[in-house]
Image (cartoon, grey):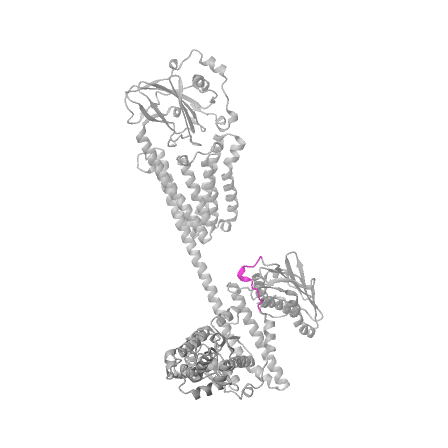
C-alpha cells in the first residue's frame, strides 16, 4: 500500500493544529502505555553490531491515537502536531550496565522527531531533518541517527514522528536499526571528513577560478567559480556538513539551503556553457530557448512552493526541469563538437567522466554493484575530475587567448615600426626633393621655372602630409599616442584655423564663415591634435563644395559638451556609404574628387583620444555636416593626460620658425671669430652631401657615416656642434646622444637630432637623452643653419661671459651635471696643489683622466680658457680671497698660491682685477 503523507503542516505553522485536551483525555482514558500493543524489545547484551528492529516497531494506524498516548507526558504548553507517520517501540535494558546506542530511522524520511518516555516522564526529545538539523551538539547525518541511553533495568518508550514528502512504500516506515555508538560515530566522522575534504577541494577550485577571473579579466572564470562554489554548498548541505558550521534560521525550513545551491548550479553552469561555447554566436535561436529554460529551472522551485504550497509537487516538477535542463546543456556540446568546434570537443571528455561517475553511482545505489569499495562516491569523484578538467581547459583557453593577444600586440607594434621605417624611407627622399627645390626658389628663377618648381614642391608637401597622417593613424590604433591636454580657450584656435583657409575659399569662390555662440569656451584639449581634426574637416568641405557654395563652421555648447560643426553645400554622401566614411582608405564612390581616405579616419581617432565623438549628417544633393562633440571639464581624462602648460600646435611652431632671424651670410657674420666645426652624422650619402653643401659656406664640416663612427670622431675632433640622424646602423641617434652626453670629454658639445620620427614622444625621447634641439625631416636647410648658428653663438656668449668673470662658479658655468662635476673636480685638483709651484698642465691632465689636448679643448669649450689660464685663474681667485681676509703680506700670499715670483704675481693679479694686490687689500672693508 502506498501512503501519501501531508506536508503542509510541516511547511507552515498555520497548518499546525493543537489536539484539544478534552478529546485527548477521552481517547486516552483508562489506557496506559503498558496496556497498549507497543512491542517490547529486551536488550540482553551490549550493542556491538547492527540490530534490526523493524519487526518489533509498531506503526500507529492513526496519528491522533499516538498523540493521545503521548499527550499526558508532554510539558505544559508544548505543542505537537497530529500529522506525519507515527510509530513506537519499547526498549528494556536487561544488562547490568548503561546501554548507549544510535538509532537509525528510515533514510527516506525527510524529517524525524523522537520522544523518549521513561517512568511516565518525557526525558528527551530529538529532531533530525534534511532541511534543518537540530543537532544539539551531536554529529548530523542524512541517515537520521537518533541517540539513546538506557540505565540497567529501565524501560524506555520511544515515539517516532516521521514526515515523507514523496510517495513512499509503507514498508519503509518500519525501518529501524540500533548501532553501536563508537563505530557509528567513527563512520560518521569518516564520511564527514571525506565530505569536508571534497567540499574544500571544490571551494579551492572556486577560489582559483576567482583569482583567474581577476588576473585575466575573463568572466568565464567567474562563472566557473560560481559553479564550483554552488556545488560545494550542495554537497556540504546534502551530507550534513553545514550542520557542523552553523544552526540555520527557521526561515530556511520551507526553502532549504540545498535548493539555493541547486539554483546556483543551474545559473552558473548555464552562464559558463553559453560563454565558453559562444552559444549566442554559434546557435542564436537555441541560445534564447536555453537561456529562458535555465532561468525557469533556477526560479521554479521557489515559485512552485509559494504558489502550490506543496513541497512534494514542487520537488517532482523541479526534478523534471533539472533533468530536461541537463539534456539541453549536453545537446549544444555534442552538436558543436560534431560540427568541429574545438572548445566543444574539449568539453566532451569532462562530460564523459561525469557521465561514467554518475552511472557507477546509480549501479551502486541500485545494489547491482553493491559492495564495491568507493562506488558510493563515484559521482562526486567524477564531478571532481570534471571540475579539474574544466579548470585546465579554461586555463589553456585563456593562455591561448593571451598568446593571441600578445601576438596581436606584437603585430601592432610591428605595423607601427613598419610605418615608422616606411615614413623614414619616404621622408629621406622628400628631404632631397624639397631642400633643393626651396634652394632653387630662393634663387629667383624664371616665372615658368618657378611655376614648375612650386608644383613639385606642393606635391612633395602633400606626400609628406599623407605620410604623417598614416604614421599618426597607425600609432593611434596601436595605442601608442598619448594625450597631453591643457585647459585652453578653443575659440581663438578654431578662428585662426578658419582664417587660414580664407584665401583658398576666395580662390574657389566659396563663402567661408565662422560663428561661435560664446566669445570664449575653455576645455581640455591638445592644440596640435585638435588642429589636425579641424584642418581635415575644413579641407574636405572646401574640396567637395562647388564654386558658389558655402562652408560654415560653428561652435556651440550642448549641456556638458562642446559641439564643433563643419557644414558644406556639396553633393552630399550616399546614405549607404555614410557608415564607412570614417574607415581607413574609404572614398565615396560618387565623389568627383580623389583623396587618400585617411583624413577622416585619423580625425575620428584623434577625437576619441579626447574622449569625444564625431558624427555625420548628410543628404545627397544638399550637403554634409560633420559634428565633433568634446566633453567639458576634466573628469573624463586620466591624471597623466592633463598638463598645466599647453603643448604648442603646429601653427605656433611654424610661426616661431618664420619669425626666427635668418642671417643671409653666416660665414660673413662670424668672420671675426674662428671657424666653428660641425660634425655631421648621417648614414644616407645623398642627404649627408645635401646638408654639407648647405652648411659648408658657414662652418667647417666633419662627416661620419654611422653612429659609432660619429662617436669616435666626436671624441677625436671635439667639434663645436653635432648634427645627427636618428635611424642609423650600429648606433642610432639616441644612443649617440646618450654616449656623448655621458662622456666627460664630449658632454659639453650641443647636439641637434634630425629624424623622420616627427611625433612628440620621439622628440621627448631625444631631449631626454640630452639633445639640445630636434628637427623633423624633411626640414628647411636654412632653418637648420639658423639653429646651428644660434646654438654655437649661445655657447660662445656663455664662454666669454665666464672667461671675464672674476670668480669661477661651476654650477653657473656648466650646462649639464657632467660638466659641473668636471669643473668641480678640476677646481678641487688645482686647489689641492695650490701652494705647489711645480703643479703643471701635465699633472692636472693626468689626475683628471684626459690628455692635454682633450683637457685644453674641454676647458676652452666651457670657460674659454686654456689649461694654463684655468690654473692661473684659480690661483688668483684664491689669492684674492686671502687678500680679503688680510691673511698675510703680498709676498706670502703669492707663495701660498703657487707663484714663485712676486713680481709676476703682481702683474697677473693686476691684469685680472685691475689693481695691484696691495691696493686690493687696502680697499677691502675693515671687519
Residue 546 visible in the shown view: yes
Viewer-nearest residue: 104 or 364 = 104
Residue for point 56% across, 74% down:
463
Viewer-nearest residue: 29 or 318 = 29
In the drawing, does residue 41 fall left or right of residue 687? left
Q: Which quadrant of the figure has residue 527?
A: bottom right
In the drawing, does residue 200 fall left or right of residue 574? left
Image position, residue 814 (x, y; %): 48, 76
In the drawing, does residue 490 fall left or right of residue 677? right
Magenta: predominant secondary structure element?
Answer: loop
Q: As displayed, is residue 127 above or below residue 498?
A: above
Residue 686 visible in the shown view: no
Viewer-nearest residue: 411 or 29 = 29
Among all residues in the image, which is located at the extreme top? 30
Image position, residue 85 (x, y; %): 43, 23
Is residue 802 shown in magenta? no
Q: Which quadrant of the figure has residue 118?
A: top left
Q: As displayed, is residue 534 above or below residue 777?
A: above
Q: As displayed, is residue 264 above or below residue 909?
A: above
Image position, residue 437 (x, y; %): 57, 82
Q: As displayed, is residue 811 above or below residue 381?
A: below
Image position, residue 170 (x, y; %): 41, 24
Viewer-nearest residue: 496 or 333 = 496
Is residue 641 shown in magenta? yes
Q: Which residues are magenta?
A: 635-647
Amino acid at each position: 500500500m502506498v501512503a501519501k503523507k501531508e506536508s503542509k503542516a510541516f511547511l507552515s505553522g498555520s497548518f499546525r493544529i493543537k489536539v484539544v485536551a478534552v478529546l485527548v483525555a477521552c481517547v486516552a482514558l483508562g489506557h496506559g502505555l503498558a496496556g497498549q500493543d507497543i512491542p517490547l524489545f529486551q536488550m540482553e547484551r551490549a550493542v556491538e553490531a547492527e540490530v534490526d528492529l523493524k519487526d518489533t516497531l509498531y506503526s500507529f494506524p492513526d496519528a491522533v491515537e499516538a498523540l493521545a498516548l503521548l499527550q499526558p507526558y508532554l510539558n505544559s504548553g508544548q505543542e505537537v502536531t497530529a500529522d506525519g507517520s507515527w510509530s513506537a517501540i519499547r526498549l528494556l535494558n536487561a544488562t547490568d550496565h548503561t546501554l548507549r546506542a544510535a538509532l537509525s530511522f528510515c533514510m527516506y524520511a525527510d524529517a524525524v522527531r523522537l520522544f523518549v518516555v521513561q517512568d511516565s516522564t518525557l526525558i528527551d526529545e530529538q529532531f533530525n531533518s534534511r532541511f534543518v538539523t537540530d543537532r544539539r551538539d551531536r554529529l548530523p547525518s542524512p541517515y537520521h541517527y537518533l541517540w539513546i541511553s538506557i540505565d540497567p533495568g529501565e524501560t524506555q518508550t520511544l515515539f517516532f514522528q516521521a514526515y515523507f514528502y514523496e510517495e513512499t512504500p509503507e514498508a519503509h516506515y518500519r525501518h529501524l536499526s540500533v548501532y553501536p555508538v563508537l563505530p557509528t560515530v567513527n563512520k560518521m566522522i569518516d564520511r564527514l571528513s571525506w565530505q569536508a575534504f571534497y567540499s574544500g577541494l571544490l571551494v579551492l577550485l572556486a577560489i582559483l577560478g576567482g583569482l583567474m577571473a581577476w588576473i585575466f579579466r575573463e568572466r568565464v572564470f567567474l562563472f566557473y567559480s560560481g559553479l564550483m562554489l554552488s556545488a560545494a554548498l550542495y554537497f556540504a548541505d546534502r551530507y550534513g556538513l553545514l550542520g557542523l558550521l552553523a544552526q540555520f534560521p527557521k526561515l530556511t525550513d520551507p526553502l532549504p539551503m540545498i535548493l539555493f545551491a541547486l539554483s546556483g548550479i543551474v545559473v552558473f553552469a548555464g552562464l559558463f556553457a553559453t560563454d565558453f561555447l559562444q552559444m549566442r554566436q554559434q546557435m542564436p535561436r537555441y541560445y534564447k530557448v536555453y537561456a529562458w529554460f535555465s532561468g525557469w529551472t533556477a526560479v521554479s522551485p521557489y515559485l512552485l512552493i509559494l504558489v502550490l504550497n506543496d513541497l512534494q509537487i514542487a520537488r517532482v516538477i523541479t526534478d523534471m526541469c533539472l533533468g530536461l535542463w541537463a539534456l539541453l546543456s549536453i545537446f549544444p556540446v555534442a552538436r558543436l563538437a560534431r560540427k568541429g568546434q574545438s572548445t566543444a570537443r574539449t568539453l566532451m571528455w569532462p562530460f564523459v567522466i561525469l557521465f561514467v561517475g554518475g552511472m557507477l553511482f546509480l549501479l551502486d545505489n541500485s545494489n547491482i554493484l553493491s559492495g564495491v569499495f568507493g562506488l558510493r562516491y563515484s559521482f562526486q569523484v567524477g564531478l571532481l575530475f570534471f571540475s579539474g578538467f574544466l579548470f585546465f581547459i579554461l586555463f589553456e583557453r585563456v593562455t591561448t587567448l593571451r598568446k593571441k593577444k600578445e601576438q596581436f600586440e606584437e603585430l601592432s607594434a610591428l605595423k607601427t615600426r613598419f610605418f615608422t621605417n616606411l615614413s623614414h624611407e619616404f621622408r629621406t627622399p622628400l628631404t632631397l626633393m624639397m631642400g633643393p627645390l626651396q634652394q632653387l626658389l630662393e634663387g629667383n628663377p624664371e616665372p615658368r621655372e618657378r611655376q614648375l618648381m612650386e608644383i613639385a614642391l606642393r606635391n612633395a608637401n602633400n606626400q609628406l602630409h599623407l605620410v604623417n597622417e598614416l604614421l599618426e593613424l597607425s600609432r593611434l590604433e596601436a595605442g601608442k599616442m598619448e594625450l597631453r591636454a591643457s585647459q585652453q580657450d578653443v575659440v581663438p584656435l578654431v578662428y585662426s584655423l578658419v582664417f587660414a583657409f580664407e584665401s583658398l575659399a576666395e580662390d574657389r569662390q566659396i563663402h567661408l564663415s565662422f560663428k561661435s555662440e560664446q566669445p570664449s569656451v575653455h576645455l581640455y584639449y591638445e592644440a596640435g591634435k585638435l588642429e589636425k581634426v579641424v584642418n581635415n574637416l575644413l579641407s574636405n568641405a572646401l574640396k567637395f563644395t562647388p564654386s558658389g557654395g558655402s562652408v560654415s563652421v560653428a561652435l556651440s555648447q550642448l549641456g556638458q559638451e562642446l559641439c564643433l560643426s563643419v557644414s558644406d553645400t556639396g553633393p552630399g554622401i550616399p546614405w549607404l556609404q555614410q557608415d564607412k566614411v570614417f574607415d581607413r582608405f574609404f572614398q565615396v564612390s560618387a565623389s568627383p574628387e580623389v583623396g587618400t581616405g585617411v583624413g577622416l579616419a585619423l580625425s575620428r581617432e584623434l577625437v576619441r583620444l579626447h574622449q569625444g565623438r564625431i558624427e555625420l549628417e548628410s543628404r545627397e544633393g544638399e550637403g554634409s555636416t560633420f559634428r565633433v562633440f568634446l566633453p567639458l571639464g576634466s573628469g573624463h581624462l586620466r591624471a597623466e593626460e592633463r598638463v598645466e602648460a599647453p603643448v604648442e600646435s603646429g601653427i605656433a611652431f611654424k610661426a616661431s620658425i618664420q619669425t626666427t632671424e635668418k642671417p643671409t651670410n653666416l660665414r660673413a657674420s662670424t668672420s671675426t671669430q674662428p671657424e666653428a666645426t660641425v660634425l655631421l652624422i648621417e648614414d644616407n650619402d645623398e642627404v649627408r652631401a645635401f646638408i654639407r653643401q648647405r652648411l659648408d659656406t658657414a662652418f667647417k664640416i666633419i662627416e661620419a657615416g654611422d653612429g659609432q663612427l660619429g662617436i669616435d670622431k666626436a671624441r677625436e675632433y671635439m667639434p663645436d656642434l653635432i648634427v645627427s640622424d636618428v635611424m642609423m646602423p650600429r648606433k642610432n641617434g639616441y644612443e649617440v646622444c646618450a654616449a656623448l652626453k655621458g662622456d666627460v670629454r664630449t658632454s659639453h658639445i650641443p647636439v641637434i637630432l634630425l629624424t623622420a620620427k616627427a611625433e612628440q614622444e620621439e622628440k621627448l625621447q631625444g631631449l631626454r637623452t640630452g639633445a639640445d634641439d630636434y628637427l623633423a625631416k624633411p626640414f628647411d636647410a636654412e632653418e637648420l643653419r639658423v639653429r646651428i648658428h644660434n646654438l654655437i653663438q649661445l655657447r660662445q656668449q656663455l664662454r666669454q661671459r665666464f672667461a671675464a668673470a672674476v670668480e669661477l662658479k661651476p654650477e653657473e658655468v656648466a650646462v649639464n651635471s657632467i660638466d659641473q662635476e668636471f669643473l668641480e673636480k678640476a677646481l678641487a685638483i688645482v686647489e689641492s696643489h695650490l701652494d705647489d709651484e711645480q703643479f703643471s698642465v701635465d699633472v692636472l691632465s693626468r689626475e683628471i683622466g684626459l690628455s692635454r689636448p682633450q683637457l685644453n679643448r674641454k676647458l676652452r669649450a666651457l670657460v674659454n680658457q686654456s689649461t694654463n689660464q684655468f690654473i692661473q685663474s684659480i690661483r688668483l681667485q684664491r689669492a684674492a680671497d686671502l687678500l680679503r681676509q688680510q691673511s698675510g703680506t703680498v709676498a706670502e700670499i703669492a707663495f701660498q698660491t703657487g707663484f714663485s715670483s712676486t713680481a709676476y704675481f703682481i702683474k697677473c693679479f693686476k691684469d685680472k682685477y685691475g689693481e695691484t694686490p696691495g691696493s686690493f687689500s687696502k680697499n677691502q672693508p675693515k671687519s
